[in-house]
Image (cartoon, helix red, strand yellow):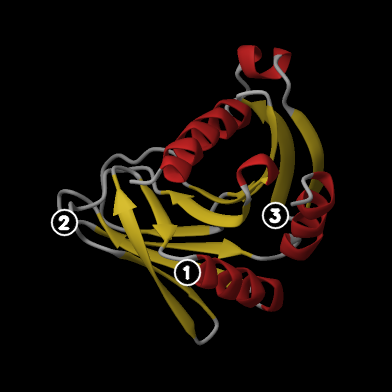
Amino acid sequence: MTKLHIHMIAAVALATSLLAGSPAMAQESAKVLGTFKDWEAHSFKEGGAKVCNMFSKPAESEGEYTQRGDVYMFVTNRPAAGVVNEFSIQIGYSFKAGAPAYATVGQRKFKLFTQDDFAWLHSDKDQNDMIRAMRGGSTVIVEGFSSRGTKTKDVFSLSGFTAAHNMIGSACKP
């Protein structure tokens, strides 16, 4: 896992705390930039540097599981680290070790690498292609397998995605 992905895990945990209404998070530097239909945009400080992210919960989830944690899709900008449009998923269970997950937007299917309960794209080109597809799409379908072999399918609405993406782009310029 790269240093940037370690930062991503920290940012996702921070954003998840905010979504859960953590009082500690509310007292820190987190700021809601806006809610755009099914997406919400935030900015916060991470190691003294400004970070912006946007996230959404699935509109639909399928799978024969008995228990599952929170599921979120994120796009994150970390200008100080040179990171723009980092796409990730927090899936709410531990992925099957070594197994990829897939995100589909329209006719485009993207392979994600997984670790624990997170998934990311493999390259900057994939990031840019995914964001372009999301800006023009209506849903993202994410499919993966849990460590117990349970297949899941989550459908995320892209309603409000472009407005939220524009917001984090202007609030955290590279």
For the residues labelled 2 and 3, the Cα–Cα distance comes to 30 Å
Q: Position of residue 53 (x, y in %)?
A: 66, 44
Q: In which quarter of the view is residue 131 placed?
A: bottom right
Near mark 3 (Cα within 10 A), the count class, few <14, some 14-19 or many ≥20, is: some
Helix, strand or loop status at disc 2: loop
In this rendering, the answer to whether 6 lies above or below 148 is: above
Q: Position of residue 71 (x, y in %)?
A: 46, 46
Mark closer to the chain start, 2 or 3: 3
Residue 159, disc:
none
In this rendering, the answer to whether 174 lies above or below 132 is: above
Q: Position of residue 24 (x, y in %)?
A: 62, 12
Q: Position of residue 46 (x, y in %)?
A: 62, 28
Q: Which residue is mark 3?
A: 38
Mark closer to the chain start, 1 or 2: 1
Q: Which residue is mark 2?
A: 149
Helix, strand or loop status at disc 1: strand
Q: Which residue is mark 1?
A: 141
Residue type beneath disc 1 = Ile
For the residues bearing labels 2 and 3, Cβ distance under 8 angstroms: no
Residue type beneath disc 2 = Gly
**Residue at the (76%, 49%) spot, across then down:** 168
Horizontal placement of 81 versus 30: left or right? left
**Residue at the (54%, 66%) spot, across then down:** 127
Near mark 2 (Cα within 10 A), the count class, few <14, some 14-19 or many ≥20, is: few
In depth, the one of 69 and 78 nearer the eye is 78
For the residues bearing labels 3 and 1, Cβ distance under 8 angstroms: no
